[in-house]
Amino acid sequence: MGTSVQVTPLCGVYNENPLSYLVSIDGFNFLIDCGWNDLFDPSLLQPLSRVASTVDAVLLSHSDTLHLGALPYAMKQFGLSAPFYSTEPVHRLGLLTMYDHYLSRKQVSDFDLFSLDDIDAAFQSIARLTYSQNYHLSGKGEGIVIAPHVAGHLLGGTVWKITKDGEDVIYAVDFNRRKEKHLNGTVLESFVRPAVLITDAYNALNNQPPKPQRERDRDFVEIISKTLEGGGNVLLPVDTAGRVLELLLVLEENWSLKSLNFPIYFVTYVSASTIDYVKSFLEWMSDAIAKSFETSRDNAFLLKNIKLLTSKSELDSVPDGPKVILASMASLEAGFSHDIFVEWAADVKNLVLFTERGQFGTLARMLQADPPPKAVKVTMSRRVPLTGEELIAYEEEQNRLKKEEALKASLIKEEESKASLATDVNSSDPMVIDTHNKHPSLDGLGQHGSRFRDVLIDGFVPPSSSVAPMFPFYDNTSDWDDFGEVINPDDYVIKDEDMDQGATRTGGDMDGKLDEGSASLILDTTPSKVISNELTVQVKSSLVYMDYEGRSDGRSVKSILAHVAPLKLVLVHGSAEATEHLKQHCLKHVCPHVYAPQIEETIDVTSDLCAYKVQLSEKLMSNVLFKKLGDYEIAWVDAEVGKTENDMLSLLPISTPAPPHKSVVVGDLKMADFKQFLASKGVKVEFAAGALRCGEYVTLRKVGVASQKGGGSGTQQIIIEGPLCEDYYKIREYLYSQFYLL
């Protein structure tokens, strides 16, 4: 029977909510993505709470909150303890994203859904894989292989391939076919006919006219420079460490080319750490960036025109005058972007430039849906130190709590000491004083008429075999040789766990480094409170949306799905209209089995193909003649199916003579490669009308089966047209040489 596959959405279907899906493969439960939104609404995670204990492994596809934002909360509240897998950039940049969100929230509220320690604990348990690395699971997941592949949306973004018994389950959301400045396009099109494809309908209705990257970047810079030249400021609400990287490169390049002098600032609590990490991830970026570094050692993220700010004090000290600020969060719900927007919104000369659609229910989405001029209500919050009576009351409360904790600790310690002594008291020992013996001759010996008390020994528990309390003694004997004391190098090695614990204690990132803004908030122990007030902001500034989301549009998505041609397709994450539209399109043009499940609805997408494990008998294989074909060996096998002693299927030699086989041409010919081959043999060759014109008389064309979906995935024929002349036979011989005749 085929590999059993069930899919259960936990969040993010028929809407644009965060992504989280349970995929079960032969009883092994994968949680693919564990997202949350910028509103941090716990009600969205209720389905996850019900299945967290059954999860066997977690796969993370991107580094933003929509894909991994709930990870710390799920570990803390739901007991999610399965192994986590991601690429290195998703791990590192996801960690910084969560730091930035926590610090932004903590600055304006008593945020307690998770802490920095919770974030560290979650991300320290992530195993990092490289692109195309096949990772074999063990234990319950024996036989399952997972591999990350390029998605093209965010740095390190992943299309996950899960393989079991030769059948592929592909998870591909938020992919991008287009090559950008810092990223290559997705490799999703390289997968042909997977058993199951899980993908999103987010952009199914978004069919923007194709525009070259250079022209798009030019329009982007022109609208910014026009505002600056008019005396206005430009605010770009961005994510912490995702699509903002593409924007930084676009601005850096154009500022250098046009010699613009307007200052640019990148403002998050972790902006310095973000760029430091990104500088070391060049091998995960586009071919152009990697090649530039190899040839000239030029790191694309050595930003010369962009200044990094990490605190409110640095932002407040920025000189007046036209400027560009890229600030988190993109949703405008919190962070530096929220405060800057409130400050700049009333000036008609300013510009708020959105480069991605705001999350549903956020201020950014509201502004995009109903552009200004308009009035909006916003809540302004800030953390201020306690003073006067509030500070006195706070200190008294803290002192009271400390005294209570100290008293509890001393009582517990005394009880433990008494319990340990009571178990070791031996009445037969002559040196042990029995405090329960009320001998009259001893009553008067105690000072002030008191009796003997228990002897409390702090610091160690005496062994039960001791006659009297003894302090422990350890004989540290050292090994010596002709050169002195023998040194064990392992005694001087700092273990990774100790380093991780040290980083956790400091509340910093995984390397123990802290941005100035992060450190000031984490290390500041001044008693404080949050004060809030609601404001009505008259939004008069310009508001423009330009698509820099880095996702394939509807036309591109449909083309890719038709090429991949999965046996079964599962649609997630998109509005109800987009999901239904893509479902109907795929039913007509991609495959007959298309599913769009609801939240907590489990659908069975087990392959209709039957796969069986068989054992090849030694007697059969001893008579098989293999022939080399590239990295593989192939052969005809004629056998009968039998059973072994363990009731396993086995292929045995046939008892009758094998029937003759028709000749089979094995291999795949690429016309461009064959053109180069013919040219190397001195044949005049060129492409004409989709065919290969060889010499003066012979034409080669490649024809696929018309009814086969997925383009080149079906049976193909190569047709040679021309008169039977010397060139015809020579070209045919060259053609046959490119294949293997079996």
Image (cartoon, rainbow, N blue to C red):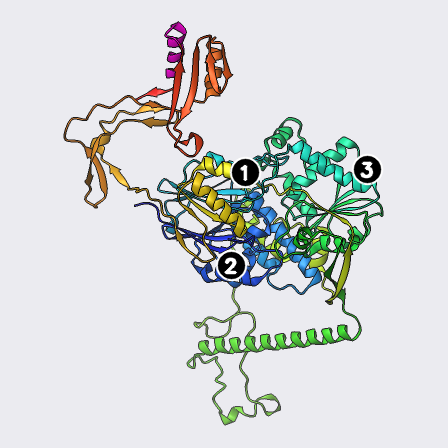
Element at badge 1?
Answer: helix
Vertical position of residue 584 compared to residue 105: above or below: above
In the rendered image, residue 217, in percent from the top left (x then y), is placed at 69, 35
Residue 532's image quarter?
Answer: bottom right
Q: Which residue is mark 1?
A: 555
Q: Indicate which disc, 1 or 3, sits on the residue closer to the N terminus.
A: 3
In the rendered image, residue 219, in percent from the top left (x then y), is placed at 71, 36
Q: The disc labelled 1 sits on which kind of residue?
A: Arg
Label of residue 482 in the image: none
Q: The disc labelled 3 sits on which kind of residue?
A: Asn
Task: Answer few, some or many: residues within 10 Å of disc 3's Cα (few below 14, many 20 plus, some between 14 and 19).
Answer: few
Q: Indicate which disc, 2 or 1, sits on the residue closer to the N terminus.
A: 2
Residue furthest toward the left?
656
Q: Nearer the viewer, mark 1 or mark 3?
A: 1
Q: Which residue is mark 2?
A: 475
* Residue 40 among those drawn in magenta: no
Quarter that holds the N terminus: top left
Measured in 3D between alpha carbons, the distance from the residue under mark 3 to the one under mark 2, in whole angstroms, is: 72 Å
* Residue 726 among those drawn in magenta: yes
Can residue 302 be seen in this snapshot? no
Which of these two is toward me, 529 or 12? Answer: 12
The region drawn magenta spans: 723-736
Quarter that holds the C terminus: top left
Measured in 3D between alpha carbons, the distance from the residue under mark 2 to the one under mark 1, in whole angstroms, is: 78 Å
Q: Main secondary structure of the magenta part?
A: helix
Q: Which residue is mark 3?
A: 261
Vertical position of residue 449 compared to residue 426: above or below: below
Can residue 562 be seen in this snapshot? yes
